[in-house]
Image: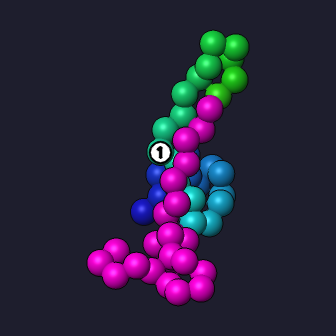
Amino acid sequence: MPNEATLLLGLDGVSVVRVERLEDGTRRVHLATAEETARACPECGPSPGR
């Protein structure tokens, strides 16, 4: 289930790992792939054991 920050972005297959505020006041958002198939090779599919 996505967290509130992930819902705020509204990007399918992406989840927010963390958000940090930088010294200049801007924010850096760390994202991760939440869609398992996104890690697969487009030509040969997922690696065995993954």
* Residue behind mark 1: 17
The residue furthest bottom is: 44
Residue 21 place in picture, x, y as percent? 59, 22
The residue furthest left is: 49
Residue 20 place in picture, x, y as percent? 54, 27
Residue 33: in magenta span: yes
| Left or right: where 32 falls relative to 24 | left
The image quadrant that residue 43 belongs to is bottom right
**Residue visible at 49% across and 63% down in the picture:** 34
Q: Which residues fall within the magenta stretch?
A: 28-50
Secondary structure beneath label 1: strand
**Residue visible at 47% across and 58% down in the picture:** 2
| Left or right: where 20 falls relative to 26 | left
**Residue visible at 54% across and 34% down in the picture:** 19
Residue 29 place in picture, x, y as percent? 60, 38
How many numbered marks are there?
1
Relative depth, front residue between 39 and 35: 39
Relative depth, front residue between 6 and 44: 44
